[in-house]
Image (spheres, rainbow, N blue to C red):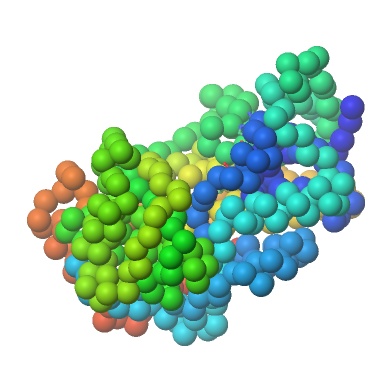
Amino acid sequence: MRTKIVIVGAGPAGMLLSQILQISGIDCLVLERKSRAYVESRVRAGVLEQVTVDLLERVGVADRMRREGLPHDGFNLAVDGELFRIDMTGLTQGSKVMVYGQTEVTRDLIEAALARGTQVVFEAEDVTPHDIEGAQPFVTYRVAGGETIRVDCDFIAGCDGFHGVCRNAIPEEIRRTFERVYPFGWLGILSEVPPCNHELIYSNHERGFALASMRSRTRSRYYIQCPIDENLDDWPDERIWDELAIRLGDEAAAHIVRGPSFEKSIAPLRSFVSEPMRHGRLFLAGDAAHIVPPTGAKGLNLAASDVHFLAEAMIAFYKDGAEDLLNDYSRKALARVWKAERFSWWFTGITHRFPDRNAFDRKMQVAELDYIRHSHAAQITVAENYVGLPLE
Ligand code: APR
Ligand code: PHB
């Protein structure tokens, strides 16, 4: 079997890339370890930068997002319950973000890909990249324990996330990794109740961080910072609602509508980058190459900007054999990745309670948030990073 590009992973990165390539007449094959149902059931973040919205528009997968997504032109910061607003749109000459769940983005992309006839193999086992340093790379995999299937290709796109196999196909002596693991996690719930505020609230409270978000006008998404080894059984819904009311403060708490959670989970927080994002005929995109703490809502959006650069490079190669964009992919993608890593690390640092820090450190957090509250210049920097920096 042969195709131009084998894409490993059917998450947002892999499915966005497959869509752009297919529309550009470049055939590809997507190999996904999990079932379609599993992939489409994963609950992830839900804030799309304009770059991501534009890409979904470009691949013709924006109809439901336009219908059901919520354009936001601001968000709130809170310090011990006192809110102030960041006017993103006013501070960035019109930029907005779109609140629309990543789960929905993935569902829309998979539905569009299958409707277009893109080859997506779910439950592909033992997907393995081969000969990435040569001119004839190939990928092997199996289905339902059957015979090994070999797919010859020109390029392999490693879109297989943090726990995938492609990153480690790059020789260890070439790979450089950079990591910060945070000493806490996020306990998140989904509940079919109206959000407490029409915009997001990121709260720094002495008891710990809290975030009020949403999936729609009737579905809320909330998070509270918790110890990374916390037991979910110790957090019945009532305790979560009580803690949210305290950490978000009286103004927001007055509008919290309580209800049963239908999703509850704890996620770790880490900053991680693996360089380079290209080795020979293997190109990494999305979580396969980098992870950000969810505070800045950058994960999906970095996957989208990686895919923008990679698709542009692959299209140029097949159009006239040009390899300059392929050769520049890692540098260009990492330039944006590192700026988003910085913002996500910084935003996490001023909003969370760090167990190993003292009263002076918290005073520094409160002072920085107070500075942002009263400084137009500071608010511009927060706003331009949150809506997404320019692609180049
Ligand atoms: N073989 C095939 N598929 C694999 C393998 C493998 N060995 N390992 C992982 N995968 C699949 C996973 O099952 C998943 O569906 O690759 C996909 C990777 O998708 P994501 O983890 O969603 O990563 P990405 O597409 O880069 O999207 C980044 O997703 O995880 C969130 O917060 C993250 O918002 C960010 C976004
Ligand atoms: C979410 O709605 O899941 C969400 C929103 C903003 C973030 C992180 C998560 O920064």
Residue 318 versus residue 57: which sits nearer the camera? 57
Kindly give the residue lying farthest to the front in the view shown: 260
Task: Indicate the quadrant where residue 39 lies.
Answer: top right
Is 84 placed left or right of 132 in the picture? left
At which x and y percent is residue 278?
A: 65, 38
Kindly give the residue lying farthest to the left in the view shown: 359
| Residue at image location 69% in from the left, 40% down from the top | 36
Task: Indicate the quadrant where residue 249 lies.
Answer: bottom left
Residue 125 visible in the picture: yes
The quadrant of the picture occupied by the N terminus is top right
64 vs 286: above or below: below
At which x and y percent is residue 377?
A: 35, 79
28 vs 67: above or below: above
At which x and y percent is residue 213?
A: 42, 64
Residue 282 versus residue 354: which sits nearer the camera? 354
Residue 279 versus residue 60: which sits nearer the camera? 60
Residue 313 visible in the picture: no
Is 338 placed left or right of 100 in the picture? left
The quadrant of the picture occupied by the C terminus is bottom right
| Residue at image location 33% in from the left, 44% down from the top | 185
| Residue at image location 90% in from the left, 51% down from the top | 25
| Residue at image location 64% in from the left, 33% down from the top | 34
At which x and y percent is residue 274?
A: 52, 38
